[in-house]
Amino acid sequence: MKKTIILTFLFVGLFIQNGLAQEIMPTSTKYTAHNKGKFYIFWGGNRDSYSHSDIHFKGNDYDFTLYDVSAHDKPKGWHVDYINPSRMTIPQTNFRIGYFINDHYNISLGLDHMKYVMTQNQIARIGGTVGSSYPDFAGTYTNASTSYIDLTDEKFLTFEHTDGLNYVNTEISRVDDISSLLTLPNTDKFQISLTEGVGGGILYPKTNVMLMGKERHDDFNVAGYGFSAKAGLNFTFYKYFFIQAEIKSGYINMPNIRTTFDSSDSASQHFMFLERVVAFGGIFKL
């Protein structure tokens, strides 16, 4: 009888312990419940807006600034070039690869391949000097209300970073799952997250310039640096695949822009940018 009572208590105790353990340690955990140790990669496209900027040009026998110059991007639209390996640099694209150091924070390396085109149809305010080596444009410009130059005919200047305005940057970002706020029942099927981050890096543009009749120059060059901040939404499907939409704003400063084949010629500018990104990617553990 005593043995039976003892065995009964042991059985009940083991049953209760097992039940508590199952409550504390669920038998199955969703893949999307934790991010630590996961890698992700994405590829997408962007549209860009730029603030007006002053562009300073200097070289042998000239030193002048164009003020409040307007510019725009060069969109490709929906096109097969986004996935054509031989033509991927033609549209405006974004590539990023990252790693989650914990469930909320990840670090990443990416390339924002934007395009910057000086608006040709504009009359720009100018200040500085152009020497007699350039007789069509020679003079001293006082930056007064009468010191303007018409850029429309392309004879004085064409200026663009179209292959492109390459912002090579690192970011640290935070991700927060908001699926529960939207009462989504199974995040392994569909998950929505907020993401925000900050980053910085170098500008490696390929700048296409024709300046005062000189030969067109178009080459890559480390021209400066940038900083940025972003916010966006991530939509993950079936654990591994996602679409991410971002708004990114930042500051670019390029004090060393190549403009001609003569190393003594250069330009400098700084401006703000606003980038809208839609990207497609995957998230996985190795």
Image (spheres, rainbow, N blue to C red):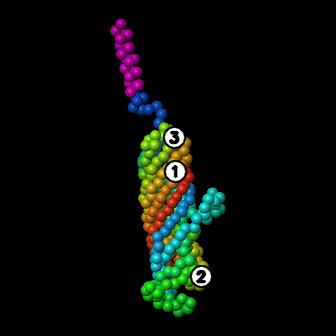
Identity, as a three-letter code, of the amino acid under mark 3: Asp
Task: Assign a secondary structure to mark 3.
Answer: loop
Residue 123: image location, x then y, percent: 52, 81
Q: Secondary structure at mark 2?
A: loop
Alpha carbon distance from label 3 to label 2: 58 Å
Rounded to the nearest whole Å, what is the CA distance between mark 1 and mark 2? Answer: 47 Å
Magenta extent: 1-20
Residue 270 vertical position relative to residue 141 in the rendered view, above or below:
above
Give the percent coordinates (x, y) of residue 173: 43, 54
Residue visible at 54% across and 74% down in the picture: 118
Place of residue 3 in the rendered image (x, y in percent of width and height, measured from the top left): 36, 10
The reply, left or right, for residue 18 in relation to residue 166 is left
Indicate the quadrant where residue 18 lies: top left
Front position in the image: 256 or 146: 146
Circle 1 sits on which residue?
40
The answer to whether residue 63 is visible is no
User: How many labels sit on residues?
Assistant: 3
Q: Of the residues shown, which amino acid type is indicated by label 1? A: Tyr
Q: Residue furthest top?
A: 1
> Is tag 1's residue or tag 2's residue first in the polypeptide sequence?
1
Residue 276 within the magenta-colored segment of the rendering: no
* Quadrant showing the N terminus: top left
